[in-house]
Amino acid sequence: MHPISQTLRTFSYTGLLLPYERSEMFFKKLPNVQTLKFQIKHAESSWQEPKLILDLDYLSHLESLTVHYRTFADNSMPAAISRLPNLEVLKLDGGIFGKTWNVEDCEFQTLKYLRLKELEIEEFNAYDDSFPLLRHFVVDKCEKLQEIPIRFASISTLKIIEVNRHLESSARYIQEEQNDLGNDLEILIS
């Protein structure tokens, strides 16, 4: 392995083409990266149904992940992202989830900042032990999303929710529930 890849802490890659089934080889070369940004595209020459297979097991030091997803395929969120042991910042941009994203118990245990931007998501469900350290939640231009997960009302670390106007009533409900628990939650509407 090249010595530079061993010491690399930040990596931005603009063209990960689908179908990309060898992500293990790619990410294995970045064992100590802490900040990773990449864009996933569908190869125009490929007639296959794109598959989002990201093997992130080698990225145990990753703290910040930004994924820009640029394809019309209806793919699922890889569970590998939720298992990253040190992930504190996650920014997702594009139609990566399909219509529903179900976050199971004990997923995203270290996440503090979550941004969802321009997703074709309609329903977002989180369960009791998901996002226990979340401080800042942003939803930007996810016009089909119907509401913020009700579970967010009981996350005591949550300090800021930023949403577009169509999610204001859902955000205000979460704010009222947080206030009843003695927590100050700031709501920003754009």
Image: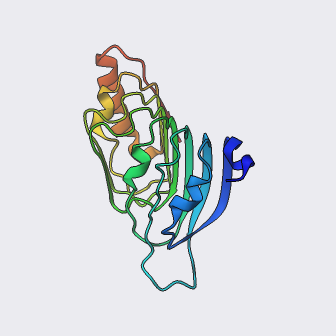
Q: How is the image coloured?
A: rainbow
Q: Is residue 111 left or right of residue 107?
A: right
Depicted 180 relative to depicted 106: above or below: above
On the image, the x and y values in percent for residue 105 come to 26, 39
Query: Is there any visible trace of residue 173 in the rendered image?
Result: no
Depicted 51 relative to depicted 57: above or below: below
Pick whichever, 98 or 83, lies toward us.
83
**In the image, what residue occupies the spot 45% across and 37% down?**
85
On the image, the x and y values in percent for residue 162 come to 49, 37
**In the image, what residue occupies the spot 45% across and 42% down?**
84
Q: Residue furthest front?
A: 1
Disc count in the image?
Answer: 0
Query: Is there any visible trace of residue 168 in the rendered image?
Result: yes
**In the image, what residue occupies the spot 36% across and 27% down?**
175
Q: Is residue 129 left or right of residue 94?
A: left
On the image, the x and y values in percent for residue 67 come to 55, 54
Q: Is residue 156 left or right of residue 88?
A: left
On the image, the x and y values in percent for residue 158 come to 42, 26
Depicted 116 relative to depicted 162: above or below: below
Q: Residue furthest top?
A: 182
Q: Residue furthest right?
A: 4
**In the image, what residue occupies the spot 52% across and 83% down?**
46
Depicted 164 relative to depicted 157: above or below: below
Pick whichever, 48 or 159, lies toward us.
48
